[in-house]
């Protein structure tokens, strides 16, 4: 079992829909990152969380440390949101462990 | 500071050739990580440095791979005698670590990756 699990692996939705991507982890962490990667592109950091909730535009990220779970939400989704979203945790010994990513496709 | 910089961004090479990638981290960051990402997978750990010391290497890092960070600043990842299975994106990241078990609160910065295609 991977130390960082994401679900779903693939998600296709219509423009405007509310999107939720989940991340569960099994190790102790000091922080969790949500990353975005467009096809053939580099990785962009969206959020770093150690507790609670953060919001940036149409993106919201939450984390529950006790349950070892985080969610990334996208409101009013748009085709330009189509990308791979990756959850990465910073473990207690400062290593970075990545999930396998969620491939999101928003249809116009 | 412009963030973590990786060069080259794209490299196409013939099988058997050597390639070298360079990563320039955030200037004050003492920790530097290398990851590899193949198609459809999340990035997988290769190695990391604390200043100039290479603290850990993954079993993914075969003897054809070598990474250095000679002055504790930029790092290079060299792949010798490339194979088609080496085709991947090589990702560098950096962070500031204050000490064991001490969370600096600083985020991790990621490079844009170096894409390698071995033909």
Image (cartoon, coloured by chain):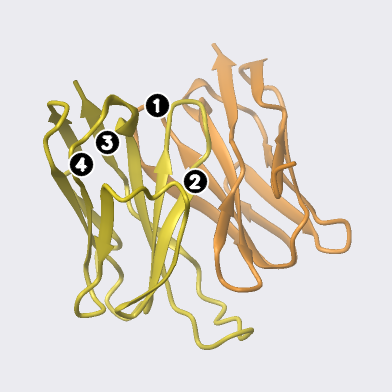
| Residue at 74% across, 60% down | A27
- Label 4 crowding class (10 Å Cα cut-off): few <14, some 14-19, many 20+? some
Residue B54 vs residue A87, the one in the foreground: B54
The hue in which chain B appears in the rendered picture of the protein: yellow
Query: Which labelled disc corresponds to residue A39?
Result: 1
Quickly name the residue at label 4.
B9
- In the depicted structure, whether residue A96 falls above or below residue A108: below
Disc number lying in front (3 or 1): 3
Quickly name the residue at label 2.
B44
Q: Secondary structure at mark 2?
A: strand
> Is disc 3 on the same chain as disc 4?
yes
Q: Secondary structure at mark 1?
A: loop
The hue in which chain A appears in the rendered picture of the protein: orange
Q: Are marks 2 and 1 in contact (CB under 8 Å)?
A: no
Q: Chain of mark 1?
A: A
Q: Are marks 2 and 3 in contact (CB under 8 Å)?
A: no
| Residue at 52% across, 32% down | B41
């Amino acid at each position: 079992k991977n130390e960082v699990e994401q679900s779903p692996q693939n998600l296709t939705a219509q423009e405007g829909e509310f999107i939720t991507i989940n991340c569960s982890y099994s190790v102790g962490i000091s922080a969790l990152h949500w990353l975005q990667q467009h096809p053939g592109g580099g990785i962009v950091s969206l959020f770093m969380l150690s507790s609670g909730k953060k919001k940036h535009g149409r993106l919201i990220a939450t984390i529950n440390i006790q349950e070892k779970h985080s969610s990334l939400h996208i409101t009013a989704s748009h085709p330009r949101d189509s990308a791979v979203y990756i959850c990465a945790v910073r473990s207690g010994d400062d290593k970075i462990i990545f999930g396998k990513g969620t491939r999101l496709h928003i249809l116009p | 500071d412009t963030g973590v910089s990786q060069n080259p961004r794209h490299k196409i090479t013939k099988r058997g050739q050597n390639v070298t990638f360079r990563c320039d981290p955030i200037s004050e960051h003492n920790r530097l990580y290398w990851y590899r990402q193949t198609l459809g997978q999340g990035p997988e750990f290769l190695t990391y440095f604390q200043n100039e010391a290479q603290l850990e290497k993954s079993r993914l890092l075969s003897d054809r791979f070598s990474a250095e960070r000679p002055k504790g600043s930029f790092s290079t990842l060299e792949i010798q005698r490339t194979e088609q299975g080496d085709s991947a994106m090589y990702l560098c990241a950096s962070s500031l670590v204050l000490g064991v078990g001490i969370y600096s609160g600083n985020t991790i910065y990621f490079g844009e990756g170096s894409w390698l295609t071995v033909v």
